[in-house]
């Protein structure tokens, strides 16, 4: 058995940083769409108010117009929030799943090469013996430089300190 620190591995991959940047850009774009939607609803409500002030609408017409705008706003808001969440999740999966697959393949390759049958993520362990850390070998498999925490020794199953 051995373990890896997947959070550290992912944090050091440039493609994860690129994916995060793309997700932030999408989030800003979606937030702007939401802001635009709110501004449109405010303009519609203001138009109804102005018609009332000019005497073009009766109080009943004003109430119906305001209720219609409020109802439409609630409907659009709920739909928008659901669509936004789905859009963000779909993009996150699209960008990050290939990276997760690449990391998992590197872990499997290292584990097979080191004759390790079980690899856990450090985050689920209650006790961590650094002598069983495969993170540096996985990072090397991914083309990243080692973090300096050590390297796994195949013959003893021990990690040698650098």
Image (cartoon, helix red, strand yellow):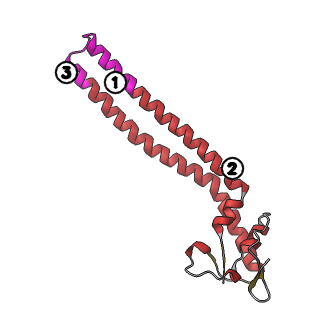
- Which label's residue is closer to the chain start, 2 or 1? 2
Q: Name the residue under label 1.
A: 45
Q: Please give the range of residues in magenta.
A: 42-64
Q: Which residue is drawn at 63% across and 58% down?
A: 97
Q: Name the residue under label 2.
A: 18
Residue 138 in picture, x, y percent from top left: 74, 70
Q: In the rendered image, which quarter contains the C terminus?
A: bottom right
Q: Residue at x 75, y 72 (%)?
A: 136
Q: Would residue 108 appear left or right of 64 to someone viewing this image?
A: right
Q: Which label belongs to residue 32? A: none
In which quarter of the view is residue 43 placed?
top left
101 vs 137: above or below: above
23 vs 155: above or below: above
Quote the CA–CA distance across marks 2 and 1: 41 Å
Residue 90 in picture, x, y percent from top left: 56, 50
User: Is the magenta region chiefly helix, strand or loop?
Assistant: helix
Q: What element carries label 3?
A: helix
Q: Do the residues labelled 3 and 2 touch (CB within 8 Å)?
A: no
Quote the CA–CA distance across marks 3 and 2: 54 Å
- Which label's residue is closer to the chain start, 3 or 2? 2
Q: What is the residue that sits farthest to the bottom in this orientation?
A: 156
Asked if the stretch drawn in magenta spans residue 48, the answer is yes
Q: Which label belongs to residue 60? A: 3
- Which label's residue is closer to the chain start, 3 or 1? 1
């Amino acid at each position: 058995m051995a373990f890896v620190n997947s959070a550290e591995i992912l944090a050091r991959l440039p493609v994860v940083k690129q994916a995060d940047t793309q997700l932030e850009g999408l989030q800003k774009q979606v937030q702007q769409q939401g802001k635009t939607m709110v501004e449109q609803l405010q303009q519609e409500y203001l138009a109804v108010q102005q018609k009332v002030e000019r005497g073009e609408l009766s109080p009943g017409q004003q109430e119906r117009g305001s209720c219609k705008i409020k109802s439409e706003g609630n409907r659009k808001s709920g739909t928008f929030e659901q669509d936004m969440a789905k859009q963000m999740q779909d993009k996150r999966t699209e960008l990050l799943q290939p990276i997760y697959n690449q990391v998992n393949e590197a872990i499997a390759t290292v584990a097979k090469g080191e004759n390790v049958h079980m690899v856990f993520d450090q985050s689920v362990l209650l006790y961590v013996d650094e002598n069983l850390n495969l993170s540096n070998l996985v990072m090397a498999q991914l083309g990243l430089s080692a973090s300096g925490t050590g390297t796994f020794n195949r013959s003893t199953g021990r990690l040698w300190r650098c």
